[in-house]
Amino acid sequence: MITLILAIVFCISFSFNSYAENTITITYGADYKPFAWGEEGVPFGVQRDFVEEILGNRLGIKVIHEACPWARCQNFVREGTRDGFFTVPTPARAEYTITSSIPFYETHFVMHTSKKNPNIEQLKTVTSIMDLERMHNLRHIHMLGSGWHENVLRNMKDVSTIPDASNIPMMLKLLRADVYIEQAEMFRYQAKRSGILDEVLTLNEPSIRKLGWHIFIGKKSKYQFLMPKISAMLETLQASGELKKIKQEIFLKHEIE
């Protein structure tokens, strides 16, 4: 009997310690301020802080945070050399990842342009992506490796990419592109940091797309079993209103209006 009890205690202790010692590696884009950026491989930003708060502080999961070029982050998770990333759902990502049941937070993607752009009045008539697809004269721009943009802009005639999203406001100012569809919070933060906020224009209406930002874990990761725990925690925090407060605190920390 004593031997049996000791065996049970050992198994319980082993299971607990194994869970406590789990270390999941989450990757973030290196050039997506203020939501995600890296300095010598060390990530900073809204996404990193959200993951640390929910997984680290709330669930007690040890997280290794890494920053790298966004396309590389996705390849790492697809290949199974990293466990997950933080972004928005796309059909391609669904093929090799699982995701949280609800988003950590939501944002609206709207159009941005230069105040000197000759196409402003045309842009003001836009109500949907389909409208933009019919405007063949417009030059679109987005960050290299953004799967969401690649999917949404796939039927546009003129699309260019740039490695560092923080340089896009300047590209609009210099009239090297006509329109950029992005979160208003991110774009205005970057334009302000570049000192050109007064020279660019955000068209808050219409909202081209409302997107939820989730954590994703690769199907090749051994930590897929954590996702139900993450989803349950998010659902609890959302129901209590605390998830909204966490967003407000993290956004304020990063000077996001």
Image: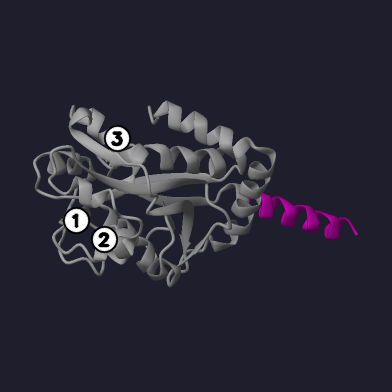
Q: Nearer the viewer, mark 1 or mark 2?
A: 2
Query: Residue 59 falls in which quadrant of the image?
Result: top right
Q: Secondary structure at mark 2?
A: helix
Q: Residue at x 56, y 45 (%)?
A: 61
Q: Could you say where residue 227 lies in the image, as x and y percent from the top left? A: 58, 58
Which numbered marker is on residue 132? Answer: 2
Q: Are marks 3 and 1 in contact (CB under 8 Å)?
A: no
Q: Residue at x 41, y 47 (%)?
A: 108
How many marks overall?
3
Amino acid carrying label 1: it is: His
Dot 3 or dot 1: first in sequence order is 1
Left or right of 138 on screen, residue 82? right
Specify how the rendered protein is coloured.
one colour
Amino acid carrying label 3: it is: Arg
Q: Which residue is mark 1?
A: 140
Furthest residue to the bottom? 95
Residue 39 can be seen, yes or no: no
Residues in magenta, as a range: 1-17
Q: Are marks 1 and 2 in contact (CB under 8 Å)?
A: yes
Which numbered marker is on residue 188? Answer: 3
